[in-house]
Amino acid sequence: MRAAESRSPVLETTLGRLERGEALEWLSALAPGSVDLVVADPPYNLGRSEWDRFESQDAFVSWSREWIRAAQRALKPEGSAYVMGWSELLADVKAAVAREWAGCRWLVWFYRNKANLRDDWGRSHESILHLRNGPRATFNTDPVRIPYNAHTTRYPERSQAETSQYGGARPERWRPNPLGARPRDVIEVPLLANGTREKTAHPTQKPVQLIRKFVLASSREGDLVVDPFAGSGTTALVCETSGRRWLACELDARWCKVAADRIRDPGAFSGSQTDAAESALARRRGRLRADAGSPRKLETREAIP
Ligand SMILES: C[S@@+](CC[C@H](N)C(=O)[O-])C[C@H]1O[C@@H](n2cnc3c(N)ncnc32)[C@H](O)[C@@H]1O
C-alpha cells in the first residue's frame, strides 16, 4: 500500500509547500539538520483505512522506526518531533525508537466527547510521543499556558511553606502568572464533531487547537515545521496562521485536494475562531453538567457528549 509515488507539488504559498508523495522517501530527501519541528500523525495500524493496514504489528514498528529515523536526520539539534498514535500500539513504537533520542515525553490527548457504547472502559484519550533531538529542545511556555485550577484562582496569593520547592531563594509570596499556569502533559481538547466548521471528510483529522499547542510550544515564528502525513492539512494550516514556514507530504490525491483547499483559505479555520467556538461549547457543557443534578435536566444532558 505504501508503494513509492513520485513526488509532485500540489500547492505552494509564501510560507510553505504541500507535495503528494510517500513519507519515508520524502523525509529522506530533506536536507540534514534543516528542520525545527516535525509534527506527525502517521498510520496507527488500526485498519481504519487502506493506508492504515500493515502485515503485523512488527511490520508497523519497523516501518515506524525507519521514517522516525529519517525525520530525526532532518532535525536541528534543538528540534523535536511529535508522533501521534493509539496508545496501546504507540507503546511498541516508543520502545523501538526512544533510546535514539535525547529525550522522550509521553503526552496524552484527553477528550470527553466520545460516546461509550460498550460495557468496557470508554476510550477518552490518544497519545503523543514528544521526541527531543538534543538536551536543549525548543520549548515556549507562555503561548501554551493553561487556565489555573479552581483552588488557585480562589486563593490567588499565598505564602510558600518553608518546605516548598519554591522556598529558599524564591520570593515568599507566590502569585499566579497572568498568562496562566504551565502546561500539563494531559491536554484536553474535544474530538472534532461532525458538522463543525473545522471538520472535513478526512476520517482522522486532528483539531487545530491540539496541533497548535505543539507548533507554538516547540517552534518559533519563521521556523521550519514539517508534516510527513498531512491528511487534511491541519499542521500546514496552523503554520499559515502562526507565521511558521512549513513543508507537508500526503500520499493520497483526495486528501491533498482537501488540504490545499483548507490552506488556501486559512482564515475560515483559524485557531482563534476554533478556540472561541470550543470555549463556548465547553461553557455550555459545564452548565449542563452542573444542571444535571436536577432530574428535569436529564434529557438535555444526554444530548451532549
Ligand atoms: C492519521 S492521518 C493524518 C491526519 C491529519 N493529521 C489531519 O489532521 O488531517 C494519516 C495520513 O497519512 C497518509 N499516509 C499514509 N501513509 C502514508 C505514507 N507512507 N506517506 C505519506 N502519507 C501517508 C494517509 O493518506 C492519511 O491522510
Image (tube, grey):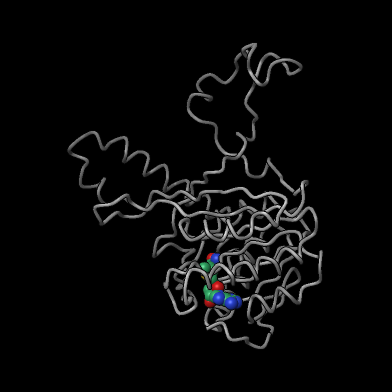
Q: Is residue 175 above or below residue 202?
A: above
Is 223 positioned to the left or the right of 151 in the image? right
Is 229 positioned to the left or the right of 124 in the image? right
Determine the residue positioned at 51% across, 60% down. 85
Can residue 260 be spotted in the picture? no
Looking at the rendering, which quadrant does residue 235 occupy? Answer: bottom right
Given residues 185 and 240, the one toward you in this image is 185
**Figure quarter occupied by ligand 1:** bottom right
Can residue 17 be spotted in the picture? yes
Percent position (x, y) of residue 164? 63, 17
Looking at the rendering, which quadrant does residue 2 occupy? Answer: bottom right
Determine the residue positioned at 72% across, 71% down. 16
Q: Is residue 92 above or below residue 251?
A: above
Percent position (x, y) of residue 7? 68, 85
Find the residue positioned furthest to the left: 295
Percent position (x, y) of residue 189? 48, 50
Determine the residue positioned at 62% across, 26% down. 176
Looking at the rendering, which quadrant does residue 283 occupy? Answer: top left
Given residues 279 and 249, the one toward you in this image is 249
Percent position (x, y) of residue 144? 63, 44
Q: Is residue 167 above or below residue 189?
A: above
Q: Is residue 179 above or below residue 273?
A: above
Given residues 303 and 32, the one toward you in this image is 32
Is 226 positioned to the left or the right of 300 in the image? right
